[in-house]
Amino acid sequence: MSVLKQASATKATCQNTANSLLAIDSFRFLGTTITRDLKWEPTISSLIKKAQQRMFFLRQLRKLKLPPRMLAQFYTAIIESILTSSITVWFAGAIVRDKLRLQRVVRAAEKVIGCRLPSIQDLYISRTRRCAGRRLRSIRTKTSRYMNSFFPSAIRLLNTK
């Protein structure tokens, strides 16, 4: 059984002596869209869309005059959990524009609730450092694509405690 789904009509088949391989542009795995060129825009767009849908409920709760503490708990449980879905995988490789789009959702929630909330950068740092205990070494490479991927960025973050 295969966990890969074809996301677009473009496909190329590579012939091997024993097996036939199907090259696809992107697929979803555990809610994260992984593209061939490792761009995270489709994943971030779907997370933002889900979070904005949940913002409707936050606004409805504010109209019902719930205290800010309960609104913040709702945000943490419902909206922040969506925004940080597999954040340790895609945040380091995300472009600045996508990070700003995510932060815009957090700022909108701050205005609705009326109190400060942790930024996306702070959430990424706290989730990455959660299981760290010792210094790690990173492989040196010349490409920025690898340096912005998960492992090197997580190692840099963990070593800067």
Image (tube, helix red, strand yellow):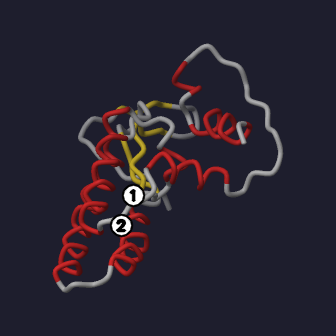
Please tell me how many numbered marks the rendered image carries.
2
Where is 58 relative to 14, above or below?
Answer: below
Observer-nearest of 130 and 119? 119
Q: Residue at x 39, y 63 (%)?
A: 82
Residue 80 rendering spot, x and y as whole percentages: 41, 64
Q: Residue at x 54, y 40 (%)?
A: 19
> What amino acid is found at the position of numbered circle 1 in the picture?
Leu
Q: Image check: 41 left or right of 145?
A: left
Left or right for 120, reference 9: right
Residue 58 image offset from top left, x and y in percent: 25, 74
Q: Nearer the viewer, residue 118 or 32?
A: 118
Which is nearer the eye, 53 or 121?
121
Q: Quadrant of residue 36?
A: top left
Q: CA distance from mark 1 to mark 2?
A: 6 Å
Q: Is residue 63 found left or right of 155 in the rendered image?
A: left
The image quadrant of residue 31 is: bottom left
Residue 85 x %, y %: 45, 59
For label 2, the residue is 79
89 on left or right of 103: right
Near mark 1 (Cα within 10 A), the count class, few <14, some 14-19 or many ≥20, is many
Circles 1 and 2, Cβ within 8 Å, touching? The answer is: yes
Q: For this rendering, which residue is in front, 65 or 39?
A: 65
Residue 83: image tag: 1
Q: At numbered mark 2, what does the secondary structure look like: helix, strand or loop?
A: helix
